[in-house]
Amino acid sequence: MPRLGAIRMKVVIEMLIKTGWIADGATREEMVRVPTFKSPLLGRGGGELRTFGGRTRFLRPGTNRKVTVGIRTTVFYRVIDGQTREFVCLGTGNIEAITLEATA
């Protein structure tokens, strides 16, 4: 059975495609060592490895708008002169706000 976050991502992705957004790859994945309760980060040997990134990315043709969709958050932004600007971060479960932003 799929997790709730995965279901929410699927709903957002389907809405983006229906409203004219197209797939544009994914963000870079990075493995980092993070402290946990069981293994606090002490020197080089502590903590646990976690993967961050790999969020699905979409662009809106004819504009400078892009969006990344993750399990917890969906982030809209613009790419102007090679720099990302005007970030709007919404909870992936907030489909109404995401739809409004996607169609604006």
Image (cartoon, grey):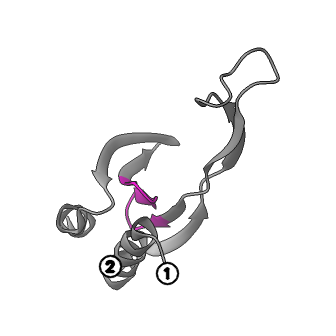
Total residue callouts: 2
Question: Tag 1, which secondary structure?
Answer: loop
* Looking at the image, residue 45 lies above or below residue 83: above
* Looking at the image, residue 37 lies above or below residue 75: above
What residue is rendered at 82% in x and 24% in y?
45
What residue is rendered at 45% in x and 42% in y?
84
**Image position of 90 (left or right of 39):** left
Asked if residue 62 is among those painted magenta in the image, a careful observer would answer yes
Residue 97 picture location, percent across and down:
18, 61
Residue 13 picture location, percent across and down:
41, 75
Q: Is residue 71 or residue 40 the one in the foreground? A: 40
- Within-10-Å neighbours for mark 2: few <14, some 14–19, many 20+: some
Which mark identifies residue 1? 1
Residue 65 picture location, percent across and down:
38, 58
* Looking at the image, residue 63 lies above or below residue 77: below
Answer whether labels 1 and 2 touch (C-beta < 8 Å): no
Tell me if residue 8 can be seen.
yes
- Within-10-Å neighbours for mark 1: few <14, some 14–19, many 20+: few
**Image position of 63 (left or right of 29):** left
What residue is rendered at 61% in x and 56% in y?
54
Residue tagged by mark 2?
A: 15
Q: Amino acid at mark 1?
A: Met
Region in magenta: 58-75
Q: Amino acid at mark 2?
A: Met
Q: Is residue 62 or residue 101 the one in the foreground? A: 101
Identify the image quadrant of residue 43.
top right
Closer to the chain start, of discs 1 and 2, is 1
Tell me if residue 61 can be seen.
no
What residue is rendered at 38% in x and 40% in y?
85
Question: Tag 2, which secondary structure?
Answer: helix
Q: Nearer the viewer, mark 1 or mark 2?
A: 1
**Image position of 57 (left or right of 16):** right
